[in-house]
Amino acid sequence: MLLEKIAKENDIKKIKKEDYKELAEEIRRFLISKISVTGGHLGSNLGAVELTMALHLSLDLPDDKIIWDVGHQAYTHKLLTGRREGFETLRKYGGMSGFPKRKESDCDCFDTGHSSTSISAGLGLVKARDLAGEKRTIVSVIGDGSLTGGMAYEALNNAAQLKTNFIIILNDNNMSISENVGGVSKYLNNIRTATGYLDLKEGVYNALQNMPKGEHIVKNIRRAKSSVKHLVIPGMFFEDMGITYLGPVDGHNVEAMMKVIREAKRCKNAVLVHVITQKGKGFAPAERHPARFHGTEPFDIETGLPSNPRTTPNYTDVFSTVMTKLGARDEKVVAITAAMPDGTGLKRFRNLYPDRFFDVGIAEQHAVTFAAGLAAGGMKPIVAIYSSFLQRAYDQILHDVCIQNLPVVFAVDRAGLVGSDGETHQGIFDLSYLSSIPNMHIMAPKNKWELSDMLKFALMLGVPAAVRYPRGNAYDGLKEFRRPMEFGKSEILYEEEDIALLAVGSMVRTAVTVRSALKEMGYSCSLVNARFVKPIDEEMVKKMAGSHKLIVTMEENVASGGFGEKVRESLDNLPDECKGAKDGKSVCRMLSIAIPDEYVEHGNVSLLYQEVGIDAETIVKRVVTAYISASVE
Ligand SMILES: Cc1ncc(C[n+]2csc(CCOP(=O)(O)OP(=O)(O)O)c2C)c(N)n1
C-alpha cells in the first residue's frame, strides 16, 4: 500500500510520479471506508484529493503554510501529515477534529470552521512572514461557495496591494453545500465553460504558443491577457484588481497542478490559481448527490444509503412544514437562507414559492440586512440561519434590524450543542448576543408543537424576533400542554413547592427527567417552561421566588449573558420579603445551570452534556447540593 509509506508530512515526496494515480485512489478508498463509519464531510474531501497531493508535493510543511477555508475538506491533508490513525476517532469526543486544529498538528497553521476567512488569515501570515524576513510559501485554499462570502472580497481587496508572494487556490467544484448561487458563481461558470484547461506542458493557451523562449510563463500569460482583454482570456476580474490569475487547471491532474503552483510561487504579488474539481469524485452516490454527501451520517458503501435512517422528524422538519403553511397563508412571507436551503429545511418553501425564496450565498451579514430591507419594503421576512453562523451578523441585527424595530423573524436553527462539528459550530452564544440588543425578542420552544406556535406568534408580533431551536429529533413529549402564546409570558407546567425549575427550550425536556428524579427523592418541584428569554417573565420569577426555597435556571447556552443571569437580576431587584419560601424562614436561593465559559469540543452530544454539566444526572446532584445548603443557611 502506498499510503503506508506516508507516516508524516513530506513523506509523499517519496512516491513516484507514476504512482500518483494509485495513491489518489488509495486515499479515496480510505476516506470512503472511514467516513462510512464515522460520518463526516465526504464530498468535498473526495474532490480535493489530488489538489491536496499537489500542494503537499509542492510545499515544505510545516514551514510552508496552508490555510483551508471552512476546513471541512482537509481530511487528505490530515492523512498526509501523520494522522492516519486519527480517522478511527474522527469527530468523536477526545478524537481527531473534522477541521484543522493548531493544537492537533504543526501542519495545521490556522483553525477554521466558518467560511470565507482563509484569504484574510493567509494575508496576515504573509505580512508576518515579510516583517520577520522569512521566506516561506503561504497558500490559502478557498472553495467557490466560500468565495460568495463578503469577507473573501475584503481580503482580496487588501491582498491586491501586495508586493510579495501569496498564493490563493480557488477550488471550484461549482457547488456550495447545494448548488452555488449568484453572480460570482456565474462568472466562474463562464470561465469553466468558455476555456480549456490550463496545461502548461502543452503551452498554456493557443495565444501563448509562439512566445519567445526563456520568459516566465506567467509574464507571457499576463501579456497575452492584456492584448485580448475580457474576450477570451479568463480571470480578468482578479487581474484587473492586481491579482494574477492562473487557470483554470484540472484539479484531478496532480502534475498539471504542481506546474502551476511552481509558477505561482514565482509571482511577486498575490496570485489566484483557479482549480476545477468535482465534488464527490470517485464515489458514485456522492457524485450523484453532492449535497447529501457534503456532510453525511454513517452510510452503507454499496448503496450509499444511511446506515441508521432517521425515523422521527427533527426541528428542521417541523420548521420546514410550518414555513410552507405560513407561505400559503400570507403572500408577504418571504424566506431567506445563506447557502443552506437543505440544512435549514427551506427547500420545500423554495419549491412552492420560488419568487419569495432567496438563497444569498454564504453571506449571513448580507442576508440579515437584505431581510431588513425586505421588511422596510413591507414584506415579512423569515431568515433561517444556524446559531453559530448568525454570530457573523451581530451588527446587522443591531444596526439594520433592531434600531429600526423592523419585523424580521430569525429562525435560529442548531441552537445548543451540535456535536461532532465541534467548537466552531456549537450554537451556545445566541441567547447572550441576541438578548444584549434592544428591541429583540427571543423565544425557545419546549417541543415540536410549540416551535410551530412560536413561529406563527413571532410573525404576528411585527417586531424583531428570534425563535431558537436545537439540532436533532423534535421533542414530542408534554403534548398535553399546548396553551396559547402570550407576549413575554412563561408557562407553568407543574406547580409545587421547595424547588422551581425554570427551563429554556431544549432544557425543558431535561427538566422533566430532573423533576421526576427529584420527586422520587422526596422533593416537591415546580417546572416552568420559560418560553421567552427576552423579555423574561418577571412576574413568574416573583411568584416562584415567593413560594420556593430554590430556583434553578436551565439553559443550553453559555452562562454569561444568558437566561440565568437575567433571572438572577430579576431576583436581585425583588425586595427580601418577596423571596421567602412558604415556611417563612428561608430566603429563596438560585442555581444557574448553563454552559461554562469555555469552547466545547466535538463529540457525541450526550457526552458533551455530561462534559459541560448540563445532563440530567449532574443537574440532579447539583440541585440537591444547592437545596441542602439553601436549607442550612
Ligand atoms: C459562515 C458560514 N456559513 C455557513 C457555513 C456552512 N458551510 C460549510 S461548507 C459550506 C459550503 C462551502 O462551499 P465551498 O467553499 O465551495 O466548498 P466545497 O464544500 O464545495 O468544497 C457551507 C455553506 C459555514 N461553514 N460558515
Image: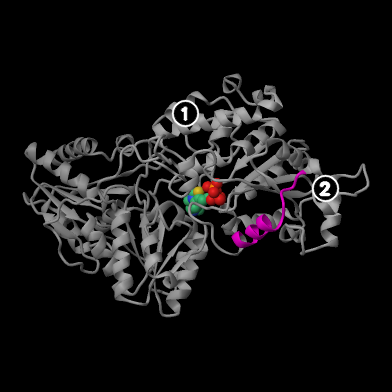
Name the residue: 25% across, 57% down: 445
Span highlighted in magenta in the image: 185-199
Q: Residues within 10 Å of mark 2 (few under 14, many from 20)?
A: some
3D distance between C-alphas at marks 1 and 2: 39 Å
Name the residue: 58% across, 23% down: 3
Q: Is residue 493 left or right of residue 151?
A: left
Q: Is residue 188 magenta?
A: yes
Q: Is residue 14 left or right of residue 539?
A: right
Q: x, y percentage for residue 415?
A: 35, 51
- Is most of the magenta stretch helix, strand or loop? helix
Q: x, y percentage for residue 312?
A: 25, 48
**Front-lying residue, 115 or 170:** 170
Question: Which label is found at residue 218?
Answer: 2
Element class at badge 1 = helix
Three-letter residue code for mark 1: Phe
Three-letter residue code for mark 2: Val
Q: Is residue 431 magenta?
A: no
Residue position for label 1:
87
Q: Is residue 246 left or right of residue 597?
A: right
Name the residue: 24% across, 35% down: 618
- State which quadrant residue 190 falls in: bottom right
- Quadrant for the N terminus, please: top right
Q: x, y percentage for residue 589?
A: 20, 47
